[in-house]
Amino acid sequence: ISRELHDDINQRLAILAIEMGNMETGPSLSAEQSRQAIQSLAQRLATISDDVRRIAYEFHSSILDDLGLSAALAQLADEFSSRTGVKTMVVQEELTQPLPRDIASCMYRITQESLANISRHAKATRVELELTCDGSAVTLSIHDNGVGFAPEQRRHQRGLGLINMRERFRAIQGRLEIHSQAGHGTRISVLVPLPGVAANEETSNLAG
């Protein structure tokens, strides 16, 4: 959250402040140019306000603690669909046991960030979330049918938060893969090994 406030919100506010300063010291604008510039600033401030409100709301999800990741993802998808009008499907396997808090929280946050990116950039009409667990690892897939982007464009996509996503999953030894093609949507797939599985396999191999 600190990183998002500093690297995203703070930078966007700084850019707005610079632009407002340029309007004050730069060449005089016509009435129509001034109206358009002020309208653009107002729209961007409103977007920043919405994002700050989202961050505050998402700071802690009680449903994640109370009912687990599956219920939290279903609610997140419903809220996203209601807010954006994008049809959102959720396919989930019944988890045999609750996930560790750090893994569940990480997957919940990555889904939030992915849906936020979809609403801002993808122009999608459909999103599919799929959560599966095979006993050794839990896998989450987020797929949209939006505009996508070419691989060479990824480094220039400042708003996608791809670095933040990778850092989240590196902290829990997870793997994040992003597949996208211009005009054919984007798929984000994450896989996180369950704690104890690797250790148990190593002990078994040593015993053998």
Image (cartoon, rainbow, N blue to C red):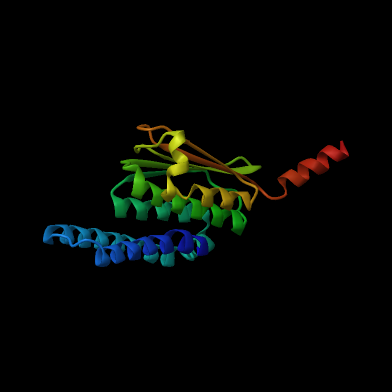
- Percent x, y for residue 176? 56, 42
Nearer to the camera, 95 or 204? 204
Quadrant of the rendered image containing residue 156:
top left
If the image is split into quadrants, where does the C terminus sit? top right
Does the rendering let one see residue 136? yes
Residue beneath the point at 39% across and 64% down: 14
Nearer to the camera, 136 or 107? 107
Residue beneath the point at 25% across and 67% down: 24
* Residue at the left extreme of this rendering: 31
* Residue at the right extreme of this rendering: 207
On the rendered structure, is 208 left or right of 178? right
On the rendered structure, is 34 left or right of 16? left
- Percent x, y for residue 159? 41, 50
Residue beneath the point at 47% across and 50% down: 161
Residue beneath the point at 44% across and 54% down: 112
- Percent x, y for residue 53? 37, 66
Does the rendering let one see residue 91? no
Tell me if residue 12 comes above or below residue 127 in the rendering: below
- Percent x, y for residue 193? 65, 45
Q: How many marks?
A: 0
